[in-house]
Amino acid sequence: MNVRRSLRPLALIACISIPLAGWADDVHRRGRPATFSTLITTPLPIEGMTGDNQGNLYVPARAVTPGQSCPVWRVNIDKPSLVVVGFIPAPSATGLCLPLGLAFDRGGRLFVGEADKIYSFVPDATKPPVADLFVSGVPGANGLAFDTYGNLWTSDGGTGRGRVWRIGPAGGVCDPAFTGCAEVFRVQPLANEVNLDAAGLGGVGRDVRTLPQGKIAVTPTTRNAADTAGSQPLVANGLAFDKDGDLFVSDTARAALWKVQFDRRGNLRSRTGCDTTFTANTLCLNNLFVAHPLLEGADGIALDRDGNIWVNANERNAVVVVTEKGEVIEVFRNSPDAATRLRNTGPLEFNTSPVLSDRVFCTANLDANRRDNSPNTAGEITPLGPFQGKISCMNEQLQSRGVALPVR
């Protein structure tokens, strides 16, 4: 690949030499938008990704065989290869292991969300361990981030209820009787709690439809037909703390970012309880930091030292940056194919988790069959292989240092 880089012993850093708006405007004005190349392809699908302070990326595979454990690979940016450093166990003999978010703690232990559990282990290429269970009872555990107190935060990315939990260093079982884990707040879900049935379905609200897979009815005979395909209820996805201890949450369904603030003791300061049809801990709308069409499909996020938020807008196969003042700038989007006019041929193929490692921006690609990436049979990776996932990196180096994770 043609990624120019100069790695230094600082973890997860994104860099720009001048205010981002000026940088992005200059790139587009000169007709030289950012470009991406493939760092490495993977034989299994991937979604979550993180990095260390040695220029390595870490990404867990997603199993395609029931009962199969998921290997976690380490990939060096300068000399990329898939090195197994651990395993996430399958949920059962018949279940699929489908890991999502990853995060390192200060001691070098790697935490990985899978279904309603979070596992942890110390990566070891010589004798890859099977990860230990850290916490259970966190349905849809998706984005992971550590705060300055050493607590692990995770978002509910699977049920659409917008829950965000704080988990103490000891882990355990996240239920009402356990004080080491608590649901701290909720991002407003698309459907409130009016008319919910026993399974938590129904409610009053709205339905964000993604095309494809959902369809717009165009004839009188079909315009009222029920079409449930393509709905997007995910409102609490990627998590990232800034240097002030504020937490940003990506809202995939609304194409938005929320900013959640805490006091010096780590207690929630952001306003909640503005709408009695939601739970009392649901954020008020004044906590919405920015909403913009460029952010449609906002998934993983990462922050740099200048306060800019790098967002994978994967339903558009795009990378977008939001400045600390809320300005929204598109850094890259796949060009349409000359013949099909679709944007599904790459280089991005449903980009999910960004990592900002010193001077290099990299992202995992899941190749999901949604919106701009549909059909997902085009491009470098495809559902039937031989390559079902990949890591892509921006060819252009970023120039000034950013923040290191975990935030201290």
Image (tube, rainbow, N blue to C red):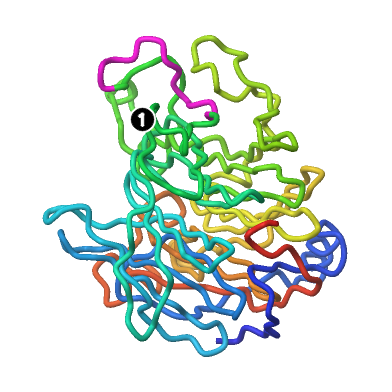
User: Above or below — where is 67 with respect to 236?
Assistant: below
Residue positioned 43% across, 62% down in the render: 340
Using residue 178 as the reference point, say whether residue 24 is left or right of it.
right
Using residue 4 as the reference point, say whether residue 90 is left or right of it.
left
Tally of marks: 1
Q: Which part of the image, by quadrant, shows the N terminus?
A: bottom right
Using residue 291 as the reference point, say whether residue 172 is left or right of it.
left
Q: Position of residue 228 (x, y in %)?
A: 30, 31
Q: What main secondary structure does the magenta stretch of the protein show?
A: loop
User: Above or below — where is 276 with respect to 38?
Assistant: above
**Residue 190 falls inside the magenta stretch:** yes
What is the three-letter code of the residue carrying label 1?
Ala
Q: Which residue is outermost to the left? A: 93
Depth check, front residue: 376 or 309: 309
Q: Position of residue 126 (x, y in %)?
A: 36, 86
Residue positioned 51% across, 54% down in the render: 314
Depth check, front residue: 169 or 93: 169
Q: Which residue is mark 1?
A: 217
Q: Position of residue 32 (x, y in %)?
A: 74, 73
Using residue 133 as the reference point, say whether residue 304 is left or right of it.
right
In the image, the segment drawn in magenta is 186-199
**Residue 218 falls inside the magenta stretch:** no
Q: Which part of the image, by quadrant, shows the C terminus?
A: bottom right
Depth check, front residue: 372 or 50: 50
Q: Crowding at label 1, few (<14), some or many (≥20) Cα neighbours within 10 Å?
A: few
Q: Secondary structure at mark 1?
A: loop
